[in-house]
Amino acid sequence: MTAEDRSAGPPGPGAGVGPAAGADPRRPMLAVRRLVKSYGDVEAVRGVSFDVHSGEVVVIIGPSGCGKSTTLRCINLLEEPTGGTLRLDDRELDFSARRTLPSGRDLARFRARFGMVFQQFDLFAHKTAIENVMIGQTVVRKVPRQRAHRESRDLLRRVGLEGMEDRRPRELSGGQQQRVAIARALAMSPEVLLFDEVTSALDPELVGEVLEVMKDLAREGATMVVVTHEMAFARDVADRVIFMDQGQVVEEGTATELMESPGNPRTRTFLARYHRGTQESAGREGG
């Protein structure tokens, strides 16, 4: 699946994640250059560079602790990078020149251009599903409550939670809570969606329902950067796959190129486990 193959989908709540009207298709929406993040003497991210075009799904894979999640958190400034540059559409940040970095309300506005979904759902336990989705709209975007309620109901329907608007998190499964978190991210009409291992805390039988929502977003033309260990999702949905190891980009290519014919020995070693698991599953089904 490529960005060009996807339909933009009907406009509605969260439509900001689709390709921008009039955007130059040759110019990346998001450009990461030589990104570095250090914790004391430890470099967690070491000169990472990649582009994300409007309507594109980029999936980052790699072993645990290789810097994938830190890279994602640096992109929306939950972690402040130590060096490098980051450009989101018309805004460029140079982390060697602090005067270019946003702060206060400007920082909040910059982060709001991204919708981030975390491993843990981070829902407000005392609020209902629809209240969790509404809160960013009413508090940050100052959307009138009636409109926010209507749009949030539509978003919950979009992620398959119609009829569950008034349930609190404890009354929802892990997969349902994660879908509320996705609806909450969409409610802010972000330009780019960031997914950080969103299925890793779920029971295996609940993973599919969350991945299906993400596949729907990809088909609708959302711009997405996804950190995941779900190799089948990367193979089926990604426009491009990036393999990271030891804080660096080791290899990058289309899903077919990287998943089926990786050029780097480290990538081949990592993916060998995935291919073995796929073959074993096929053997069990065939038997």
Image (cartoon, rainbow, N blue to C red):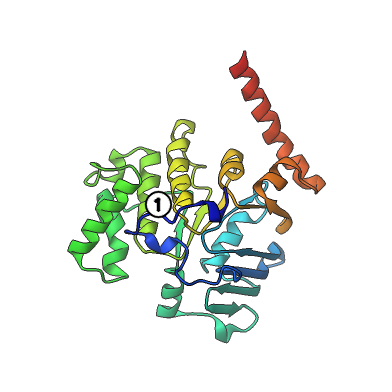
| Position of residue 166 in the picture relative to residue 155 (left or right) | left
Residue drawn at x 57%, y 78% as measured from the top left: 92
Residue 187 makes an appearance in the image: yes
Query: The residue tagged with tag 1: helix, strand or loop?
Result: helix
Picture coordinates of residue 100, whole percent (x, y): 56, 84
Residue in the picture at 36% in, 41% down: 176
Residue, disc 1: 182
Relative to 138, is 245 on the left or the right? right
Q: Nearer the viewer, residue 74 or 22?
A: 22
* Location of the C terminus (image quadrant): top right
- Is 275 positioned to the left or the right of 155 in the image? right
Residue 103, given in percent of the width and then of the height, sits at: 47, 80
Is 258 situated above or below 31? above
Crowd around label 1: few <14 · some 14–19 · many ≥20 (10 Å): many
Of residues 271 and 104, the one nearer the viewer is 271
Look at the picture and state if 259 lies above or below 114: above
Which amino acid type is marked by label 1?
Ile
**Residue at horizontal 63%, vertical 23%?**
282
**In-front residue for pair 265/107:** 265
